[in-house]
Amino acid sequence: MGTVVIIGGGPAGYVAAITAARKGQQVTIIEHQQLGGTCLNEGCIPTKSLLESAETYEKVKRAAAFGIDVPADGVSVNWRGVQQYKGKVMKKLVLGVGYLMKKNQVQVIKGKAAFLTDRIVKVEKADGAEQITADRFILATGSEPIELPFAPFDGHWIIHSSQAMSLPGIPASLLIVGGGVIGCEFASIYSRMGTKVTVVEMAGQLLPGEDRDIAEVLTRQLEAAGVTIYTGTSLQSLDAAAKTATVQKRDRVEEIQAERVLVAIGRKPRVEELGLDRIGVTYSRQGIQVNENMQTSASHIYACGDVIGGIQLAHVAFHEGEVAALNACGIEKSVSYHAVPRCIYTSPEIASVGLTEMQAREKYGDVRIGEFAFTANGKALILNEQTGKVKVIVEPKFNEIVGITIVGPRATELIGQGTIMLHTEMTADAMEDFIAAHPTLSESLLEAVLNVTGQAIHG
Amino acid sequence: MAAEVIMPKLGMSMAEGTVIGWKKKVGDQVTKGEGIVDISSEKIEMELEAPADGILLAIAVADGGVVPYGTVLGYIGQSGENLETTSHAAAGTAEHQEVAATAMMEEKAVPAPAANKGSSLKISPVAKKIAEEAGLNLESIVGTGPQGRITKEDVEKALASRAASGPVATTPASAAASASTPAPMQTASAQEVVETTPVIGMRKVIATRMLESLQQSAQLTMTAKVDLTELLSLQKQLAVEIERRQEGKLTVTDFIARAVVLSLKKHKQLNSAYFANQQEARIETYGHVHLGIAVALEKGLVVPVIRHADTLTLLEISKAIKSLGERARNNQLSGDEMKGSTFTISNLGAYGVEYFTPVLNPPEAGILGVGAIEAVPMYRGEELTRCSLLPLSLTFDHRVLDGAPAAQFLGSVKDYLEHPYTLLL
C-alpha cells in the first residue's frame, strides 16, 4: 500500500482522495479552509442557492399570471433568511464531503501545505507545524479571483465573488466589472432582488466565447430586468471616496456611481504558496503544467482542477481528480474533454456542450444548424417561460452532433440529454425515431435535432 | 427465458476471448454442466459448460470470433422458445421455426462477414459511419471506449495508420467489396498457400509479446558448458531412494531449476524487471523468486509459474514442475498460475538443441535456455574420461545489468550444477 497526499479539499481534491482510497492507498488530504473548496463554500452551490431565492421571489411576484393572487405589498425579500437558507445548504454538503472522507478512511488535516523537498510537505496548522512524507502527491489547490492591478479588493467597496454572496444587505446599486459567467450570474441574482445593476464588459458581447445569438437572448432579458449593460467598454478608474467608476466606450467617457463594485474578470490558479520552485515542478501564471495523465514535470506529483488552468468547472475538476488519482495508483487513464457541459445559471439559463456554432464553422466550414424556439413548446407556455431556444450543430458529412446550446427554462437540466448525445458520438439521423415525452421541455431538444434534417413537427 | 452462454473473464488482465470451437450444433440437446464450447483467453483455453438443460437455440459468436468478456456466445432454452435471433424465421410450428433457425445459424457459423458481426460490436454511431465509408474492417479496430467501445478517435487513428502504412493496392472492385466484407490479407501471389491460420488466441499473444520483447529491450545471449557428470551420477543414486518413496523421479530440469533459484538469490540483478513509459523507467528487483517454466503445447507455449520457488527444496520444486506441466498440457491452468514470474527457464534439450537464443519474457531481465546433454571425452589432468556436458544459454536485458554480473550469475549456476550436493542442502 502506498501513501498519497492530496493538497486541497475541493472537487478535484476530494474526488481524487476517494478514488485513491478505493484503490487501496493510504490517503491524506490537506485543506486549510472547509472541505468542498470554492464549489461548496464560495462558488457553484451558494450562488445557486441565491439564484433559487431570486427565482422564487420572481415567481411569487408573477403568481397573478397563474391565477394566484398575492398582495403586492405582502411580498418581500428577507435577506437574512436568504443567507440562512444558503448556509444550511452549504453546511449539509460540506458535512457530506466530510462523511465521505471518513467512510473511505481518508485522513483530513486542516492546514496550509508547502513542499520542503519533493517527498515532504510541511503543513502549518493552528497548533503548530507538521511534516508529512508520501510516495505520491496530488495538487488541487484550486483558484482565486483575479484583482484589478489598479484597484485591489478592499472587501467593502471593491469586492470579489466570494464577498458578493455574503453581503450584509441587498445593495441599492451594484457595478459588475466583467460580463462573463460569474458577472452575469450575479447580475441575475441582484437585479431580481431589486438592486440597480450595471455590467461593464470589454468584449463586444456578454459571455464572450458563447455564440452571439445566445448572448443576445440573455442581454435582452437582463435589460428587461433593469440591468444596464455596457459592452465594448473598459473600466478606466475607481474612486473609492466618491464611490464612482469611470468607464470608456470608444471615445466616450462616463461615470457610474455604485454602492459596491464586484470585480469578476476571471480566476487565477493558486500556485504561489506550494513551494513548487523548490522541487522543480513546471508551472506558469496559467497554472501547473500537466500531461494527459494529469502528471506534472515531477513524475510522482500530479495536479488537477482549477490549479492547472484550462476549463475551470467543478465537474471537470471531478473528472481530472479521478484521472489524477488513478494514474497515481498506477492505473493509466487519459483525461477526456470531449463532452463537457457548460452551465450558466442566469435567467434564462444557458447551457451548452461541445462546439459553439462559431467554433464548428471554423472546424468544419459548412455546418447544419437545427433550432427550435421555446415559444412553440407547450410546457414552456405552461411555465410562462417562453424566452429562448435550442440550437443543435451538426457536422455535414456524417451528421455527427458536434454541439448543442440551450438558452431558456431549465436549460442546465436539459443539457444532460445533449451531453449524452455528444458523449456517445450520436449522429442526427440516429435520432429520427427517438420518442420524447409529452408535454416536456425535452421535446424542444428532439425537435431541434429533427430540424437539422427539416423534419421537425411543431417548428 | 433462454439461458445465456457468456464469455467468462479468466484472470484480471483478460479483455477479450476467442471462441475456439463449438462442440454442439444449434438444435442439439444439451445437459447442464456438459461442455459445449471451447474458448481461450490470452493464455489459457477452457471448455464452457452449459448453464442449463435444454436445446442450443442459437450461436451468437461463431468459431474464431473474438469478443470482450461478458459477451453472450449463445442461448440455451426450450424448443420453440422465441429468441430475437430466430425471429426472422417464417411463422409456423415450433418445429419449423427451429429448423429455420438452425439453417440460419449454420449459415452464420461460416466465417461471418464483418457487417454481420458489426451489429454486435460496440461502436459509436459516428465512428461506424466513418469506418463504413472508408471501408475499414471494424473487427480490426481496437476500441478504447468503455468496455472496448470503438470511438470516433479510434477509427480516425486506424485510418491514419492505414494511410501511414502506404496505399493498400485497391482496385475499384476490391474497394467496393471491402465495404461489406473483410479484405483478405495480402499474400504473395507466387506462393501456394497450403493452409491459412488466423492469428488468434494464444498464437496472437505469443506473437505480440515476443515481438515486443525483441523490439523493446536490449537483450543478448551468452553461453556456457556445464559438466554434469557428477550430477548425473548423483541423480542415479537418488533415483533408487526416491522411487522407493514413490515420489516420482528427479529430472535434470529439476536440478537446474534449483541451481537457478539459488543463483538468483545470490545475484539479484537477474531477478528483476524493467518497466518504462514515456516519462520514466524503473527497475524492480525482487526478494522472492517466482520461477517460470516454459512448456510447449501443441498450440503454442505457456509459462506456468512456481511461486516462491526460493522457499522450496529440490524435491518440492520437482513436484511443482511436474504438476504444473501436467496441468498445462491438460489445459487446466488458471490465468493466475501463468503470471508474475521473475525469471524463466526454457528447456529444448529433448529436441537435441545445443545453444540457442531464448527470448526474454517481458518485463523479466533474464531467461535461461537449456540444451541437450552430450557425452564427450574430456581431459581431466592427463586422463581422458567420459563426461556429460550441458549447454546453457542465458539471455539477459542489458538495460538492467551488464555482461560481467550476468556472467557471474551463469558461473554460479554452473558451479552449483557441477557441485550437485549443494543443491540438496
Image: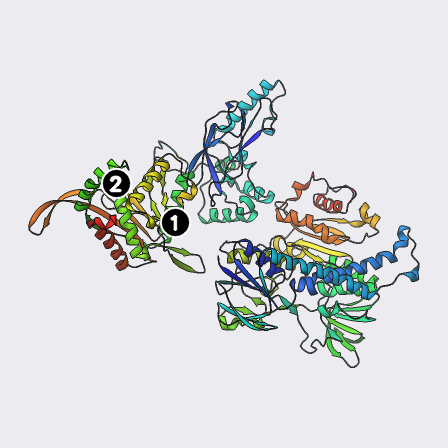
Q: Is residue A309 left or right of residue B109?
A: right
Please identify the quadrant where the C terminus of chain A is shown: top right
- First reached walking from the N terminus: tag 1 or tag 2: 1
Same-subunit check for callouts 1 and 2: yes
Residue A218 shows in this picture? yes
Residue visible at 23% across and 54% down in the picture: B411
Query: Which amino acid lies under the numbered mark 2 shown in the image of this protein?
Result: Leu
Task: Specify the label residue A37 is tagged with.
Answer: none
According to the picture, the residue beneath numbered tag 1 turns out to be: B212
Of the two numbered discs 1 and 2 in the rendering, the one whose residue sits closer to the viewer = 2
Q: Secondary structure at mark 2?
A: loop
Q: Position of residue A397 (x, y in %)?
A: 61, 46
Q: Position of residue A264 (x, y in %)?
A: 71, 69
Q: Do residues under tags 1 and 2 come within 8 Å of each other at their CB atoms?
A: no
User: Which amino acid does the dot numbered 1 rest on?
Assistant: Glu
Left or right of B69 in this view: A434: right
All told, the count of numbered labels is: 2
Distance in Å between CA atoms under marks 1 and 2: 35 Å
Furthest residue toward front: B245
Q: Nearer the viewer, residue B368 or A233?
A: B368
- For label 2, count other residues whose C-alpha is less than 10 Å away and answer few (under 14), some (14-19) or many (20+): many
Percent position (x, y) of residue A179?
73, 66
Which chain is disc 2 placed on?
A: B
Within-10-Å neighbours for mark 1: few <14, some 14–19, many 20+: some
Side of B143 where A387 appears, left or right: right
Is residue B14 shown above or below A273? above
The answer to whether any part of residue A368 appears in the image is no
Q: Residue under mark 1: which chain is it in?
A: B
Q: Is residue A278 above or below residue B375?
A: below
Provide the residue designation for mark 2.
B250
